[in-house]
Amino acid sequence: MAQAQQGSKVKIDYRGLLEDGTVFDSTFESDLADDDCGCDDEQCESGDCSEDDCGCGGHAAGPMELTIGDHALFSQIDDALVGMAPGETKKVIIPAADAFGEYDPEKVFDVPRSDMPADLQPEVGDELVLTNEDDEELGVCVVEVKPDSVTFDSNHPLAGEDLTFEVTLVEIL
């Protein structure tokens, strides 16, 4: 039976899980049906969903095509795929440090309301992009709104999380 090698183009199915069992990304339609990202089913199925917290991960259900070694996901997944045969499943655990990094409390900061546009009415949970005077952009999440300032968190939403991927090699192309 054929086995996947470095450089092989393959189709895989996967499910990304947090330690508590929460699915954060998946190619399985059954996992995507429960998303609450505000995208309609057509957007998620077409891959037009752009919400970072969407259960669909911004892609349509169904196997993902990738070339082993191109790091379309994490390098540990590429490594696990090498030597797999179609139909085989492996579990890959990626420590937080190798995934989206450890949670860094120094990436949580306050911005005075006077430094923000007057029409901006942020709410806890809003995801925004801040731009500094050098036009550098920083993705943030609003974590607290106070009368005179807003607290932002610029950590990735999955920072500090160990990730588990259940990966099935569907086909070698």
Image (cartoon, rainbow, N blue to C red):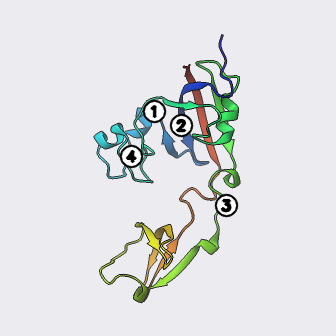
**Which quadrant: the C terminus?**
top right
Q: Which mark is residue 35?
A: 4
Which three-letter amino acid code belongs to the residue tagged 3? Glu
| Badge 1 vs badge 2, beta-carbon distance below 8 Å | yes
Q: Badge 4, how many Cα within 10 Å: few under 14, some, many 20+?
A: some
Q: Nearer the viewer, residue 116 or 103?
A: 116
Q: Where does the image place residue 13, in percent across and percent down from the top left? A: 52, 30
Q: Earlier in the sequence, mark 1 or mark 3?
A: 1
Which three-letter amino acid code belongs to the residue tagged 2? Arg
Q: Which mark is residue 15?
A: 2
Q: Where does the image place residue 56, in percent across and percent down from the top left? A: 42, 43
In the rendered picture of this protein, how many numbered marks are placed on residues?
4
Secondary structure under the numbered disc 3 in the rendered image: loop
CA distance for labels 1 and 2 = 7 Å
Q: Earlier in the sequence, mark 2 or mark 4?
A: 2
Secondary structure under the numbered disc 2 in the rendered image: strand
Which three-letter amino acid code belongs to the residue tagged 4? Asp
Rendered view: 50 above or below 5: below
Which three-letter amino acid code belongs to the residue tagged 1? Phe
Q: Earlier in the sequence, mark 3 or mark 4?
A: 4
CA distance for labels 3 and 4 = 26 Å
Secondary structure under the numbered disc 4 in the rendered image: loop
Q: Residue at x 59, y 34 (%)?
A: 166
